[in-house]
Image: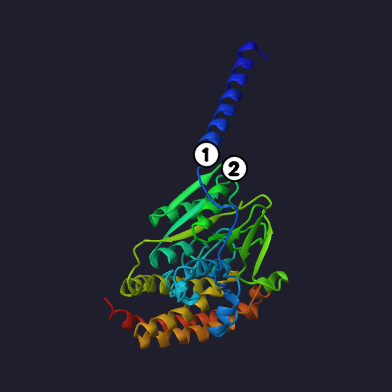
C-alpha cells in the first residue's frame, strides 16, 4: 500500500467519523417529557369489527391500529368508516408478482398498508411518519411518497432511532402506531411508556395467545419498525368528495376486472385473492346507504354476497381447478352486477 493510499484511507475514515459525530451531536435530545406517561386508548380489533359486519376476517390490523389512533380524538370513529375513507372500497386491481407468466394477486387498488395514511388525511388529520433509512422492510418509498403527497411529515433516521421524540409525542397525549414493537411483531398502538417499558394495545391478542389487548413489555431496542401518528388540523374531505373519489375508480375497475377474468380463463394461476375485495364492497354498501344512495348500496351488498364464497379460499387450495373455476364464475357475476350500477354512478356529479 502506497503512502498516498494510506493518507487517502485515513482521511476518508476521519470524514466518516466526523460526519457520524456531527449527526449524533445535532440530533441529541431536544425534547422534554416526563419519566413515564400512559393514556387509556380504546381497543379496536379488526376481527371483532368485521364479524359485526357479517364475516370475521383478519389481516386488517394496520387499519385497526389506525382506527385506535383516530378514535382517541373522536370516540365516535368506527373501523368501517376509516376503511371507507380510504376511497378504494369499490375498486379492483391485480398484478403479476413474478412477471407476466406468473400467477396473479387480486386486491383493491392501492391497497398497501400505507393506505391508512390516506384514510387519516381524508378524515382531516395530518400524518407523521418515521422510518429507518436502511432497515424498512422494503416499504420506504411507499410511505415516504404517500406521506409527502398528503402534505404530511416524513423523516428518515439513520443511526439512533428518535425515542426521545416518540416519548415527547406520547407525553403530549398523542398515541403512536407502529408496524411492530418489542411487544408485538405486527401493527399495534403505543399508548404509554416508563423508563424501561412500553405500553401497547394489540388489535387481535388471541392470535398470539394473549388474554388481554393491553400489555406492557421491556422496551428492548425500542421502536425500530415504521412509526406513525396523526394530529388534527388537516382538511377533511366532504362526503360528496369521497363519493366522487369512489366514482372515479369504477370504470377502470370494471375494465381491470374484465381482463382479470379473461386471464384466468386463458390459464393464469391464482396466487392470492384478497378478502378485502369482499370487505370493500360491504363497507361501500354501508357507506352509500348512510349517504342516501340505496340503489348503489344494494348493488354493492349484492357484490359482497357474490364475493363471500371466495373469502375462505386460501393457498394452497386457491389454485385448484375447482377454486379457480369458482373465482371465475363469481367474478363474472360481480362484473355484470357492477356494470349495472354505472347508470346510478352517472347520476352523481
Q: How far is disc 2 from disc 1 in space, using C-alphas?
A: 9 Å
In terms of depth relative to the viewer, which is nearer, 322 or 109?
109
Query: For the residue labelled by badge 1, is the local secondary structure a helix, a strand or a loop?
Result: loop
Q: Residue furthest top?
A: 3
The quadrant in which residue 29 appears is top right
Q: Indicate the position of residue 127 as horizontal and vertical percent values.
A: 44, 58
Q: Indicate the position of residue 159 as horizontal and vertical percent values.
A: 59, 41
Residue located 47% across and 72% down the image:
83
- The residue carrying pointer 2 sits among few (fewer than 14), some (14 to 19) or many (20 or more) residues within 10 Å by Cα, namely few
| Residues tagged 2 and 1 counted as in contact (Cβ below 8 A) | yes
The residue at which mark 1 appears reads as: 27
Q: Indicate the position of residue 303 as horizontal and vertical percent values.
A: 47, 83
Query: For the residue labelled by badge 2, is the local secondary structure a helix, a strand or a loop?
Result: loop
Q: Is residue 316 visible?
A: no
The quadrant in which residue 291 appears is bottom left
Residue located 55% across and 67% down the image:
65
Q: Is residue 238 visible?
A: yes
Please tell me whether residue 258 is drawn above or below residue 171 in the rendered image: below
Q: Indicate the position of residue 84 as horizontal and vertical percent values.
A: 44, 74
The residue at which mark 2 appears reads as: 160
Amino acid at each position: 500500500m502506497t503512502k498516498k493510499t494510506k493518507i487517502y484511507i485515513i482521511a476518508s475514515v476521519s470524514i466518516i467519523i466526523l460526519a457520524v459525530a456531527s449527526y449524533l451531536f445535532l440530533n441529541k435530545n431536544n425534547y422534554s417529557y416526563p419519566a413515564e406517561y400512559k393514556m387509556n386508548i380504546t381497543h379496536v380489533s379488526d376481527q371483532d369489527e368485521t364479524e359485526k359486519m357479517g364475516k370475521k376476517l383478519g389481516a386488517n390490523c394496520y387499519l385497526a391500529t389506525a382506527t385506535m389512533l383516530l378514535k382517541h380524538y373522536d370516540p365516535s370513529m368506527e373501523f368501517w368508516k376509516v376503511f371507507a375513507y380510504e376511497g378504494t372500497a369499490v375498486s379492483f386491481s391485480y398484478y403479476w408478482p413474478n412477471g407476466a407468466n406468473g400467477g396473479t394477486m387480486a386486491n383493491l387498488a392501492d391497497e398497501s398498508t400505507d393506505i391508512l395514511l390516506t384514510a387519516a388525511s381524508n378524515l382531516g388529520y395530518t400524518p407523521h411518519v418515521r422510518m429507518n433509512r436502511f432497515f424498512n422492510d422494503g416499504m420506504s418509498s411507499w410511505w415516504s411518497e404517500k406521506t409527502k403527497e398528503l402534505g404530511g411529515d416524513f423523516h428518515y433516521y439513520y443511526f439512533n432511532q428518535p425515542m426521545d421524540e416518540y416519548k415527547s409525542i406520547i407525553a403530549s397525549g398523542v398515541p403512536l402506531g407502529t408496524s411492530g414493537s418489542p411487544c408485538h411483531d405486527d401493527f399495534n398502538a403505543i399508548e404509554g411508556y416508563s423508563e424501561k417499558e412500553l405500553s401497547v394495545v394489540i388489535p387481535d391478542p388471541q392470535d398470539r395467545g394473549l388474554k388481554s389487548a393491553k400489555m406492557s413489555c421491556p422496551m428492548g431496542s425500542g421502536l425500530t419498525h415504521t412509526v406513525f401518528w396523526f394530529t388534527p388540523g388537516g382538511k377533511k374531505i366532504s362526503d360528496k368528495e369521497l363519493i366522487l373519489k369512489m366514482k372515479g375508480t369504477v370504470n377502470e375497475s370494471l375494465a381491470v376486472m374484465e381482463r382479470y377474468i379473461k386471464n384466468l380463463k386463458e390459464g393464469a394461476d391464482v396466487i392470492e385473492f384478497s378478502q378485502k375485495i369482499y370487505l370493500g364492497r360491504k363497507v361501500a354498501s354501508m357507506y352509500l346507504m348512510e349517504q342516501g344512495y340505496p340503489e348503489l348500496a344494494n348493488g354493492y351488498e349484492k357484490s359482497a354476497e357474490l364475493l363471500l364464497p371466495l373469502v375462505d379460499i386460501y393457498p394452497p387450495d386457491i389454485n385448484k381447478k375447482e377454486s379457480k373455476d369458482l373465482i371465475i364464475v363469481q367474478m363474472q357475476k360481480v362484473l355484470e352486477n357492477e356494470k349495472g350500477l354505472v347508470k346510478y354512478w352517472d347520476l352523481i356529479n
